[in-house]
Amino acid sequence: MKIIKTLLFFGLITQFSLSHGYSDDGHKIVAKLAWQKLSPYARQNIERLLGVGEGQFIKASTWADEVKGDDRYRYLKPLHYVNLPKDQSQYDRKRDCRKDQCVVQAIFDFSEMARDQDEKKAKLALRMLIHLIGDIHQPMHAGLKEDRGGNWYRIKYQGDNINLHKLWDHQLVDRIDRDWQKAAALLSYPESEDVLGPVQWAEESHRLAMSVAYVIEEGQSVTEAYLAKADVVSRDRLALAGWRLAMWLNKLW
C-alpha cells in the first residue's frame, strides 16, 4: 500500500513493459460476467463510485488502458503484469515484484484503497481492480521478463506477423465472437472454483503461459492444434476472471 500511495502523491515515472491487457472487448466480457454475480451491497457501493448501472461498470473496465497515454497516470503502467522466471512455478514477491510494482501487489493495494473515504482515490482503485483482475488471468501477463510477456516474441497468425502477447489479448478473444456481448453470452461460469487470490491467479497464468502459450516456437505459424488448446484456455480464463472479479468485489463490501 505504501508504494501505491507514494505513486499517487508524487506521480513517480517508472520503466514499464510493453504489455497491454486484454483487448477492450476482453475486459468488457470480464466486466459483464462479473456484474451478473455481484451482491446487492457490492453493487450499491460500486454504483456510488462509478455511477448507476451495468454500463458504467463495463465502461470502467477499459479505463486503465485508455489513460496510458496520459502522463498523469504513467505511474500505473508497471502494475498491469508480473514476470516469473521460466523455471519457476511459484510467485516470489521479493524476486518478481520489485518495489511492489506488479499486478499481484497492485490488486492487494487497490483493494484496500477502494474502501478509502476519499472518493477520488476509491474510484481510481475500483477502476484499476476491475481491469487488473482481468489482466492477471491472461496468461501472458505472467509471462517472461526477457520477451516482455510475449511482446517481443514474434509469431505468424493467418499470414500476419504479430507478437504472442497480442494473439492472447486480441485474436483469441475475437475467435469466440467479434461481438463482445455475444461472446460473453457464450461463456459459462465455473461450476465450482475457489476464489483464491492474486498470488494463485498469477501462478495459474504463468503455468498456462509456459505449458500452452509459449509452446509455439518463435517465428512459426500458429497451427490449428495450437489454437484448439489456446481457445479452451482463453475462454476458461475470461469466464474465471469474470466470476472471480465479482467474488473479490463482494468480499470488499
Image: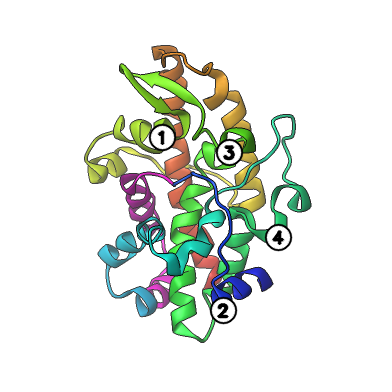
For the residues marked 3 and 2, what is the alpha-carbon distance in whole angstroms?
31 Å
Q: Secondary structure at mark 1?
A: helix
Q: Residues within 10 Å of mark 4 (few under 14, many from 20)?
A: few
Disc 1 from disc 3: Cα separation: 16 Å
Percent across and percent down for residue 212 are: 55, 24
The residue where tag 4 is placed is: 99
22 w.r.t. 53: above or below = above
Label 4 and label 1: CA atoms lie apart by 27 Å
The amino acid sitting under disc 3 is Ser
Q: Main secondary structure of the magenta part?
A: helix
Q: Residues within 10 Å of mark 2 (few under 14, many from 20)?
A: few
Q: Which amino acid type is marked by label 4?
A: Lys
Mark yes or no: residue 197 visible: no
Q: Secondary structure at mark 3?
A: helix
**Labels 4 and 1: the sequence-earlier one:** 4
CA gap between label 2 and label 1 equals 33 Å
Q: Residue at x 28, y 74 (%)?
A: 52
x 44%, y 46%: residue: 20
**Label 2 element class:** helix
Residue highlighted by disc 2: 9
Q: Residue at x 31, y 46 (%)?
A: 25
Disc 3 target residue: 205
Q: Dot 1 surroundings within 10 Å: few (below 14), some, or many (20 or more)?
A: many
Q: Earlier in the sequence, mark 2 or mark 1?
A: 2
In the image, which residues are magenta? 21-46
Alpha-carbon span between mark 4 and mark 2: 16 Å
x and y, in percent, of residue 113 in the image: 56, 75
Q: Would you name the residue on which mark 1 appears?
A: 166
